[in-house]
Amino acid sequence: MIGHTDNAVEIDAPTGFVWDQTNDVSAWPELFSEYAKAEILAETDTSVTFRLTMHPDEQGRVWSWVSERHWDRDTWTVRARRVETGPFEFMNITWTYEELAPDRTRMRWVQDFHMKPDAPLDTAAMTDRINANTLVQMSLIKEKVEKRRREVIGFHDVPSNRRRGGDLRTLVSPATRGSSSGFCGAVRLAPGEKVSEHYHPYSEEFLFVARGTLRIDLDGEPVTAGAEQALLIPRNVRHRLTNVGEEEALAVFHLGPLAPRPELGHVDTEPYPEQVSA
């Protein structure tokens, strides 16, 4: 008899966000309730070998084993197997992700295995145990992933992007909070500092100046926006931001809809500031 389980859960989040959250093996102890430790042993762009250590069981035993995972993001598929099989003769796992809506994903786990003759549980009993535990873990993962989408994020919680000038930070995005229609962030500019000219071929940009005074060059035509003023920057319009005031400026931006891929969202039309000074 070959053990076989097939379980699925629907999570209210975009597929890419669910994928990123659930395939970060190093963070599994924060996502699963059964794992005490995850150690990455080897990693490539499409695979990872790792050791998992569980919390002690009812008898105080600590189970640990090495597994490897291989993934194909284009097909939203992950295949895994235990390298150190322990009580299993073999354990093969397939995870698949299906987009049901822009912000709803079905995650499915299929496991095929067989127990060794001297294992503490036979294959039928292990099938029942895995099915019961999978429902617990999937419910927990659904709760945690959906909660992460609603968490407040601060300016200093994300890395700074200074390539185009200023201190620019993307706060709410597909990567940070699983947004499905756009992203937003903020930029701080010192007096005289600028964000170099670029345009967005897929997105409108909504710009709100929270503090200071900015000159925004739109296709070469300057407009000025002061504190608590807003501006629409249409698709394909070249724009450059310059702080023309005497204090630090803070501007909030939102772009939508999303480009097909992140690298297509911005087209630069002049060198970055550091390239100018080089």
Image: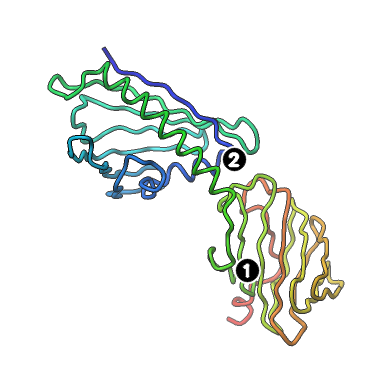
Q: Amino acid at mark 2?
A: Pro
Tell me where residue 25 sits by quadrant.
top left
Residue nearer the viewer, 178 or 260: 178
Instruction: Identify the residue at the far front of this view.
Output: 58
| Left or right: 272 in relation to 110 | right
* Residue 270 position within the rendered picture, expressed as x and y whole percent measured from the top left: 70, 70
* Residue 23 position within the rendered picture, expressed as x and y whole percent measured from the top left: 43, 42
Q: Which residue is mark 2?
A: 14
Instruction: Identify the residue at the far top of this view.
Output: 1
170 w.r.t. 98: above or below: below
CA gap between label 2 and label 1 equals: 25 Å
| Mark before the other along the chain sequence, 2 or 1 | 2
Picture quarter with the N terminus:
top left
The residue shown at (64%, 75%) is 166
27 w.r.t. 221: above or below: above
Picture quarter with the C terminus:
bottom right
* Residue 42 position within the rendered picture, expressed as x and y whole percent measured from the top left: 29, 49
The residue shown at (30%, 43%) is 49
Is disc 2 placed on a helix, strand or loop?
A: loop
Q: Which residue is mark 1?
A: 168
Do the residues under discs 2 and 1 have CB atoms within 8 angstroms? Answer: no
